[in-house]
């Protein structure tokens, strides 16, 4: 059963913690209160050893319309900077927590809502979902969403989204690499939970090591990336789960993770 927080609904039955953005009347706009609460909840859930993945969803008609623009009215420069500092902390937390974070958007994911999808490790969307970095239509270039989007899709596709603010459909988002795949809305939960259970069969230690390493190396120069990842896989190999996996392969049996 989901527990209601101020801005979230949380169902933390292992192996997945399902966190639902719960401002449906505001199309789950990312207020600073919501972003702070989500950051804290991601950290809390990731610290639970029985949680093997975290799923992010949206209540109501869509995933998220992005930043709460009402909150951004008549603010000083320092106050605006604080809003985006809170957002940056949230996005960094999504990628720093030691378990996979899976976005499961439906309806719309726009601006910072699209950024949140792009920032998640994995994303399965309903086939009715549309994505946009639409700030330009309101005189606000989606500068921070562009960081995440440009790390998922090609530069030309990223700039098409950022410069025009046009929506793309789920099929296009899948083709461009913004999401892993699109599925019928009625199958969305089933597909996400199937992915969670697949991940839950794997070594939590190896997944954590791999996620940390991936984000460390992906922006590094190739030689530096190989050095970092050679050290990572060496440590992985001598760790208990690494040795157990190697033994299980050699002995042709299913591994038992510590």
Image: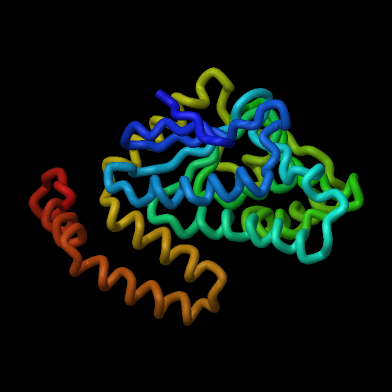
Q: Is residue 191 left or right of residue 87?
A: left
- Residue sitting at x 62%, y 46%: 33
- Residue sitting at x 67%, y 41%: 173
Q: Is residue 201 left or right of residue 8?
A: left
Residue 23 sits above or below residue 251 on the image: above
Residue 145 sits above or below residue 105 on the image: below
Q: Nearer the viewer, residue 189 or 127?
A: 189
Residue 193 place in picture, x, y as percent: 41, 30
Any part of residue 144 in sight: yes
Any part of residue 177 in sight: no
Query: Looking at the rendering, in which quadrant would you find the N terminus?
Result: top left
Q: Nearer the viewer, residue 78 or 84?
A: 78
**Residue at the top extreme of this rendering:** 186
- Residue sitting at x 63%, y 57%: 86
Residue 126 place in picture, x, y as percent: 60, 28
- Residue sitting at x 72%, y 43%: 66
Q: How is the image coloured?
A: rainbow
Q: Count the marks.
A: 0
Residue 149 place in picture, x, y as percent: 68, 54
Q: Is residue 116 left or right of residue 212?
A: right
Residue 26 place in picture, x, y as percent: 72, 31
Quarter-of-image position of residue 240? bottom left
Quarter-of-image position of residue 63? top right
Q: Nearer the viewer, residue 86 or 98?
A: 86
């Amino acid at each position: 059963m989901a527990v209601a927080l101020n801005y979230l609904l949380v169902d933390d039955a292992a192996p997945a913690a399902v966190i639902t953005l719960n401002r449906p009347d505001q199309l789950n706009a990312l207020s600073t209160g919501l972003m702070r609460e989500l950051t804290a909840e991601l950290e809390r859930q990731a610290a639970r050893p029985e949680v093997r993945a975290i799923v992010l969803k949206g209540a109501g008609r869509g995933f998220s319309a992005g930043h709460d623009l009402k909150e951004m009215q008549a603010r000083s420069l320092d106050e605006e900077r604080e809003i985006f500092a809170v957002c940056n902390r949230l996005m960094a937390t999504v990628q720093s927590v030691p378990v996979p974070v899976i976005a499961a958007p439906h309806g719309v994911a726009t601006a910072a809502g699209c950024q949140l999808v792009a920032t998640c490790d994995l994303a399965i969307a309903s086939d009715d979902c549309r994505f946009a970095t639409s700030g330009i239509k309101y005189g606000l270039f989606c500068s921070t969403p562009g960081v995440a989007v440009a790390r998922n899709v090609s530069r030309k596709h990223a700039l098409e989204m950022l410069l025009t603010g046009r929506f793309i459909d789920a099929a296009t988002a899948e083709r461009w690499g913004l999401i892993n795949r699109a599925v019928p809305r009625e199958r969305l939960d089933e597909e996400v939970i199937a992915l969670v259970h697949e991940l839950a069969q794997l070594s939590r230690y190896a997944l954590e090591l791999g996620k940390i390493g991936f984000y460390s190396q992906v922006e590094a120069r190739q030689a530096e990336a190989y050095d970092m990842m050679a050290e990572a896989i060496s440590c992985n190999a001598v760790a208990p789960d690494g040795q157990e996996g190697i033994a299980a392969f050699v002995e042709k049996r299913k591994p038992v993770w510590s």
